[in-house]
Image (spheres, rainbow, N blue to C red):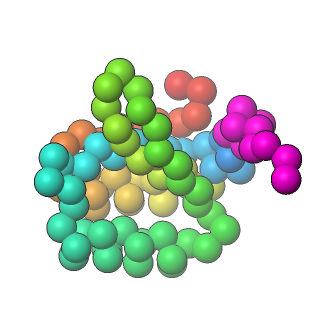
């Protein structure tokens, strides 16, 4: 088994899905109902999103990356109010 080339994977993801939303969940985590809404949102967009988690500046977050800016904006609008912090950005910014 070859090791995962994380830099290559991120570049490929950033090329296909450049519109991202970084969500930091609240300390107690998202309620089950919000988790279900996130899953439903993503399932409605097969092959048009990717996600991964990172730790940056001590903040654990999940980055949801979308192919289309409108999807990223809709995701941000729907889930930012229930997150501790949410950042909408384009890869490379």
Q: Is residue 57 left or right of residue 46?
A: left
Q: What residue lies at 68% left-to-right and 46% top-to-bottom?
A: 13
Q: Is residue 93 left or right of residue 82?
A: right
Outermost residue toward the front in this view: 1
Res. 11 visible in picture = no
Q: What residue lies at 41% left-to-right and 26% top-to-bottom?
A: 56
Outermost residue toward the top in this view: 57
Q: Is residue 90 left or right of residue 6?
A: left
Res. 46 visible in picture = yes
Locate residue 47, reporting x and y percent: 66, 68
Please tell me which residue lies in front, 4 or 71.
4
The residues colored magenta run 1-12
Locate residue 39, reporting x and y percent: 41, 73
Outermost residue toward the right in this view: 2
Kindly indicate the quadrant of the structure image that contains residue 33: bottom left
Q: Is residue 59 above or below residue 68?
A: above
Q: Is residue 47 above or below residue 88?
A: below
Q: Is residue 3 left or right of residue 49?
A: right
Locate residue 86, reporting x and y percent: 30, 42
Q: What residue lies at 59% left-to-right and 27% top-to-bottom?
A: 92
Kindly indicate the quadrant of the structure image that contains residue 75: bottom left
Looking at the rendered structure, the number of numbered marks drawn on it comes to 0
Q: Is residue 49 above or below residue 33?
A: above
Q: Is residue 30 magenta?
A: no
Q: What residue lies at 48% left-to-right and 70% top-to-bottom?
A: 42
């Amino acid at each position: 088994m070859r090791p995962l080339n994380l830099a290559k994977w991120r570049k490929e993801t950033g090329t296909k899905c450049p519109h991202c939303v970084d969500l930091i969940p609240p300390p107690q985590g998202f309620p089950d109902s919000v988790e279900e809404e996130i899953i439903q949102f993503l399932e409605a967009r097969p092959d048009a999103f990717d996600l991964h988690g990172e730790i940056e500046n001590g903040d654990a977050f999940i980055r949801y990356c979308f192919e289309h800016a409108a999807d990223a904006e809709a995701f941000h609008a729907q889930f930012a109010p229930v997150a501790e912090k949410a950042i909408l950005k384009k890869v490379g910014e």
